[in-house]
Amino acid sequence: MLRRVTQPVIAVALAAALTGCFNSAEPVLEVTGSTMGSSYSIKWVGVGDSPEPAALQASLEAMFEQFDREVSGWREDSDLASFNASPVGACRQIPESLVDLVKAAESLNQRSGGAFDITVGPLLDLWGFHGPVGKHVLPGDDELRHALERVGQHHLRLDGDQLCKDADVLLDISGLAAGYMVDEVVEHLGVHGITSYMVEITGELKAAGLKPGGSPWRIAIEEPRDDDRVAQLILPLDGYGVSTSGDYRNFFEYEGKRYSHTFNPRSGTPVMHQLAAVTVLHPSTMQADGLSTVLHVLGPEEGWEFALAHDVAALFVVRQGTGFVSRATPEFNALRKGKE
């Protein structure tokens, strides 16, 4: 029997409830909406010459629409779709956003020994994560081998703003896109003099500054449960992005086994280890986004060693029996203690 669960992994499920209520001349302002197939929530402390919420939201919506035209994998007229549809051997001019994302992906791919890869589109198609609910099947060995022939960032070459491919690759930049846009929104807020904010897009988040009254922005890191959202850890956040990757919000079950939407690009199979979730803190939300994927792909042992070797601030939550065991890297503990 096959069962599919598709809910976003959100490290900040209780963030909205933790912003609090204030009696202050400096109110916490907020705009919310939909983007990238999910939602966004942006809170900030107004300053004297900052725009009104409606005006700021209009400028943000324009940013989101442009980004969607550039990198959406779901619309046929996006720059990403145009590149994916181009023939083997072709080069295409790509916008600055895609240049930045491809460069970041190249770095993560090299650092992780191929655990991070933006050419996993054929695997998502093969395993049924692109398409209607209920499409999931377990592919045969020949199908998997053919799909893997189209996977690998070594098939890509970036020359200035020209991206070229030597195989029929399908790019999927969802492992970096939301974090990238969080950082873009933060930069946009800074242009307007806004330095105290909490920006959340599809579960990726960054916060900085203090709320009225001098208290920090606080986030709630989820306990990785299938049936409910429960805060495992409440963490003040100032100047760091946070991202969580896990197998408990988007997966399917077949004959008692759980198949995550996160793939090991080297084997072509969903991750099947006991690492339920990993949360990463980083000054760049895009890097937090990508690194949480890297650690989730690598798993509880190899991922832990990678995090230690690369000084990653990470919290690992590992299944053990019917419960979970958590452990944090020294960098994560230092940030946590420094903000308590």
Image (cartoon, rainbow, N blue to C red):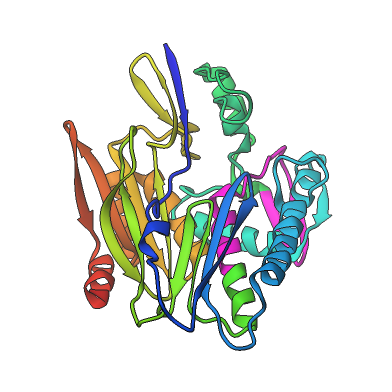
**Whole-percent x, y for residue 224 in the image:** 31, 42
Quadrant of res 230: top left
Q: Residue at x 33, y 37 (%)?
A: 228
Residue 219 versus residue 262 in the image, above or below: below
Give left or right: position of 335 versus 174: left
User: Relative to the observer, which residue lies in front, 40 or 295?
Assistant: 40
Question: Which residue occupies the foreground of this view, 168 or 172?
Answer: 172
Quadrant of residue 219 in the image?
A: bottom left
Q: Tell me: residue 209, above or below residue 204.
A: below
The residue drawn where x is 74% and y is 56% is: 65
Q: Nearer the viewer, residue 143 or 11?
A: 11
* Residue 280 falls in image quadrant: bottom left
Q: Residue 261 placed where, x, y %?
A: 48, 35
Q: Locate the C terminus by quadrant.
A: bottom left
Judge whether residue 161 is colored magenta: yes
Q: Against 111, is 259 above or below?
A: above
- The residue lying at 71 percent from left, 60 percent from top is 61
In the image, which residues are magenta?
156-184
Q: Taking 194 as reference, is 229 above or below it? A: above
Closer-to-camera residue (325/273): 325
As for residue 256 lying within the magenta part, the answer is no
